[in-house]
Each structure stands twice: as C-alpha cells, then as structure tokens.
Image: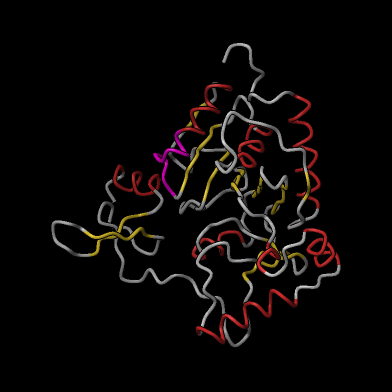
Amino acid sequence: MTGYNFAFLDEGSKRLVRRALLKAVAIPGYQTPFGSRELPIGRGWGTGGIQITLSIIGRDDTLKVIDQGSDDSVNAVSIRGFVSACTSIKTTTDSEEATVIQTRHRIPETPLRNDQILVLQVPLPEALRLVEPLESVTKKMHAEMDYAPIWLALYENIVRVGEVELGADYPVMVEDRYIMMPSPIPRFDNPKLNNSPALCLFGAGREKKIYALPPYTKAESLCFEDHPFRLEDMSGRVCRLCGAAGVFMDEFFDSATGEKQYQCSDSGYCGKRRKNGK
C-alpha cells in the first residue's frame, strides 16, 4: 500500500513487539505486557496476533491465515488480504508451504516443523481469570505459583458433572512452572503444543499481553492422576469430502438425508488430501 511502511507498523512499534517476544520466549508461559498499537481492524478480530505477524514477517516469508480451521472465513480472508496488501509477500492455504501461520481457534492437522512459526490470536490470556477477577492478584498468584484455586475449580467441575466441561481454552502447565491459556483451541489440539518443534507465539491485543512456547517446550494439560485429560472422541467419524479419520471434525446435519455428516475442520488439510487423491 503506497505511503505505508512495510508490514504497516512503524519500525519502532515492531521493535517493541519483538523485544516483548524475546522476553516471552526466554520465560515460556509468562505473560509479557506490550504497548498494543491501533490497527485498521476492530479489537476482537485478533489484533494481538496480527501485530506479532506484522512484526516478524519478512519479505521471503510465506503466510497462511486460518480461522476455526478455515482459510476462507471472513476473519482469515480479511487478515490475509491486509497483510498481503502491506507486504506483497506470498500467501498460501498449504500448511507445509507456510513459514508463518496465523490462526484463530485451531492448530493445523499437518504436523508443524522447526522452521515454522505459529501465531495464535488470543482473546483472554489470563488462565487464572476463571477463578480471580483482579489482575494484581493473578500476577501475585503466578509469582508465588499459587495455583490451588484453579485446581479446586477443576476438581469441583469433576465432582459436579463427572468431567471437566472446558471444550476449548483448556489450561496447560508450561515446564512445570506457569499455567497458561492455550487460546480457544479445542482440547483436541492441546497435545500439539506439547514439545512442538515450531515456535508458538500468542498475542492478545485488547489485553496487551504476549506469551510464547519455544520449540520443544513441555506444555501439559491440567489433569488429575485418577482423572486423566481426555480429548474429544472423533472415533468413527470420517470426512465426507476427503475420507480422513482421526482429525478434528465439524459436525452438521444433511438436510436432504436428515443424517449427521462430518467434515475436516482444517480446510487446507482437507483440500490437499482431495487434490492428492487420498
């Protein structure tokens, strides 16, 4: 875009974000505050993740943007178009081609590599907000590793309904030190964060927080010895388009037959399987 700096943000703002990222990478799971900038996108559309992407993207990078697993949602198309317009970099729907993947609510089904960066958009970065409304108190709880209230909340949930009801944003313990919110990804994606070869960066623009998981970092979902962490059950589900099984599926009813149908949530993964004839 004529008259704008490469990647829209001025160089000073990008340096500020990158400094926050360095601290976040040095202290995995720790929420690093940063000066969130204004963007021509409404807050709540992933401005934290966008600022990270704009600050780290280079002219030789290839960008993939997904929302709820789809490359074609309004959020994904708008962000991809914005970044492309102010950088002219190559974009793709193939996870294997991308060097930077910005995502909301999903982690790609294709295993990530150590030469890739995963940027997650985060609406609520504070895992302890479930049990404590005051920021000053949650900071102290993290510093003292006082996580008894969140363990108690999970225990009460199990006693009340028989299991932890959190379907997304299921908290993880990072390197046995910080409890971290993994962004609103489904529980199915939580294991992909544990010892991931890719650098995972999390940005919350409205809350002005950045945190990170460096490659090969331990990130285990909270659970009890007698009540282990459980994934969504995708057994018996087969994608109606590509025939995939064992991946996260979207469920809907076929109005013509009145029967349940399943389809890969990751549209890029599904499209590539169909293209390759699998």
Give the mark count.
Answer: 0
Left or right for 236, reference 126: left
Residue pushed farthest top? 2
Residue pushed farthest front? 133
Q: Residue at x 38, y 68 (%)?
A: 234
Give the position of the N terminus as an image quadrant: top right
> Foreground residue, 239 or 163?
163
Question: Residue 7 at what x, y percent from top left?
Answer: 63, 25
> Foreground residue, 29 or 4?
4
Question: Residue 54 at what x, y percent from top left?
Answer: 64, 31
Q: Is residue 7 above or below residue 125?
A: above
Magenta highlight on residue 89: no
> Foreground residue, 31 or 200?
31
Q: Residue at x 44, y 40 (%)?
A: 94
- Colour mapping used in the image: secondary structure
Question: Residue 12 at what x, y percent from top left?
Answer: 79, 26
Q: Is residue 263 above or below residue 188?
A: above
Q: Write down the quadrant of residue 77 in the picture.
A: top left
Question: Residue 116 at what x, y percent from top left?
Answer: 60, 43
Left or right for 29, reference 121: right
Q: Residue at x 29, y 46 (%)?
A: 274
Magenta highlight on residue 76: yes
Q: Is residue 60 above or below residue 100?
A: above
Part of the protein shown in magenta: 69-77
Q: Write down the quadrant of residue 262 in the picture.
A: bottom left
Residue pushed farthest left? 256
Q: Residue at x 48, y 51 (%)?
A: 108
